[in-house]
C-alpha cells in the first residue's frame, strides 16, 4: 500500500480500487474472498459462505472505496467516468452487504445496568 501511494500512478491507484471492488462484490455475492488486493482476484474464493466478520469487513472496505470513487468527480480528467462500471458494481455490492448485516439491538433493548454507586 505504501509503495502504491508513494510511487504509484493514477492508473495503478484505480486498478487497486477495481481489485478491492471485485473482492467486495465477491463477498456480497456469497463468496469468501481470500487473498489480498494487488494479487489475482480470480481463483481467490475461499471455502464456504462469508461469516459475519467477513461481511462487516467487506462492507467497511466497500464503503471506503465507494467514497474514493465518488470523490473522483471533483478531480480534473476522465477518472470519474472511467470508473463508472466499477462504481455501479460497488454500489450494488455495498447495498447487498448492508441488507445482510444483522440488525443492531436498539438502545432500549440493552440490559439495564444500574449506575455504579447508586443505591
Image (cartoon, rainbow, N blue to C red):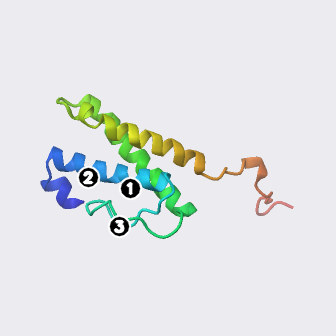
Q: Which mark is residue 23?
A: 1
Question: Helix, strand, or loop for circle 1?
Answer: helix
Q: Image quadrant for the C terminus?
A: bottom right
75 relative to 9 in the view: left or right: right
91 relative to 97 in the view: left or right: left
Q: Which mark is residue 45?
A: none
Residue 46 falls in which quadrant of the image?
Answer: bottom left
Verify CB contact (< 8 Å) between mark 2 and mark 1: no
31 relative to 101 in the view: left or right: left
- Front tag of 2 and 1: 1
Verify CB contact (< 8 Å) between mark 3 and mark 1: yes
Percent of width and height locating residue 8: 15, 52
Q: Badge 2 is on which residue?
A: 16
Asked whether 84 or 59 is in front, the reply is 84
Q: Badge 3 is on which residue?
A: 35
Q: Image quadrant for the N terminus?
A: bottom left
Q: Residue furthest bottom?
A: 47
Q: Residue at x 48, y 44 (%)?
A: 94
- How crowded pointer 1 is (Cα within 10 Å; few <14, some 14-19, many 20+) is rated as many
Q: Residue at x 77, y 59 (%)?
A: 115
Percent of width and height locating residue 27: 47, 56
Question: Helix, strand, or loop for circle 3?
Answer: loop
Q: Residue at x 46, y 63 (%)?
A: 32
103 relative to 38 in the view: left or right: right
Mark 2–mark 1 Cα distance, whole angstroms, equals 11 Å
- Does label 2 or label 3 sit earlier along the sequence? 2
Asked whether 108 or 103 is in front, the reply is 103
Mark 2–mark 3 Cα distance, whole angstroms, equals 14 Å
- Relative to residue 47, is residue 60 depicted above or below? above
Percent of width and height locating residue 6: 15, 55
Amino acid at each position: 500500500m505504501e509503495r502504491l501511494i508513494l510511487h504509484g500512478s493514477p492508473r495503478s491507484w484505480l486498478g487497486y480500487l477495481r481489485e478491492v471492488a471485485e473482492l467486495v462484490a465477491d463477498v456480497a455475492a456469497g463468496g469468501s474472498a481470500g487473498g489480498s488486493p494487488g494479487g489475482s482476484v480470480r481463483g481467490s474464493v475461499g471455502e464456504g459462505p462469508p461469516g459475519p466478520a467477513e461481511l462487516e469487513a467487506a462492507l467497511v472496505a466497500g464503503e471506503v472505496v465507494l467514497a474514493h470513487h465518488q470523490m473522483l468527480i471533483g478531480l480534473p480528467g476522465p477518472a470519474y467516468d472511467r470508473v463508472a462500471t466499477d462504481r455501479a458494481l460497488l454500489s450494488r455490492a455495498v447495498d447487498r452487504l448492508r441488507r445482510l448485516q444483522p440488525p443492531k439491538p436498539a438502545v432500549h433493548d440493552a440490559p439495564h445496568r444500574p449506575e455504579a454507586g447508586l443505591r
